[in-house]
Image (tube, grey):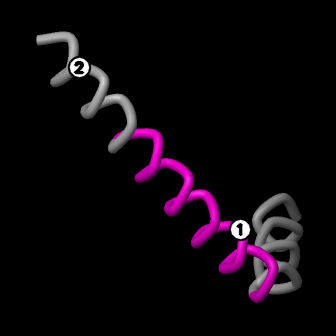
Amino acid sequence: MIYNNCFHFLSSLLFIVITYNYFSKFFVLNNHIIIFGGNYAIN
C-alpha cells in the first residue's frame, strides 16, 4: 500500500514536470500571440 502510493506520487510528479516543461516551451514560442490575444480581449 505504501509502495503503491509512493509510485503513484512519483508518476504524478513526473507527469506534472513533463506537462509544465511542454507548456512553458509552448508559451515561449507563442508568447507574443498570447499577449496580443490578451490585449485584444481586454480592449
Whether label 2 touches label 1, CB < 8 Å: no
Q: Residue at x 73, y 74 (%)?
A: 27
Q: Is mark 1 on a helix, strand or loop?
A: helix
Q: Which residue is drawn at 33% across and 44% down?
A: 11
Q: Quadrant of residue 38?
A: bottom right
Q: As displayed, is residue 18 above or below residue 29?
A: above
Label 1 sits on what residue type?
Ser
Residue annotated with mark 1? 24
The foreground one among 9 and 22 is 9
Q: As displayed, is residue 15 above or below residue 22?
A: above
Q: As displayed, is residue 36 above or below residue 4?
A: below
Relative image position of residue 7 (x, y in whole percent) = 27, 33
Q: What stretch is highlighted in magenta?
A: 12-29
The foreground one among 5 and 31 is 5
Q: Residue 34, which numbered label?
A: none
Q: Mark 1, residues whose alpha carbon is within 10 Å: few (<14), some, or many (≥20)?
A: few
Label 2 sits on what residue type?
Asn
Relative image position of residue 40 (x, y in whole percent) = 82, 73
Q: As displayed, is residue 15 above or below residue 21?
A: above
* Residue 43 drawn in magenta: no
Mark 2 and mark 1: span between their CA atoms?
28 Å
Q: In this view, does 10 lie to the left or right of 21?
A: left
Quadrant housing the C terminus = bottom right
The foreground one among 5 and 19 is 5
Q: Mark 2 or mark 1, which has the lower sequence index? A: 2
The foreground one among 3 and 41 is 3
Relative image position of residue 36 (x, y in whole percent) = 86, 79
Q: Which residue is drawn at 41% across and 52% down?
A: 15
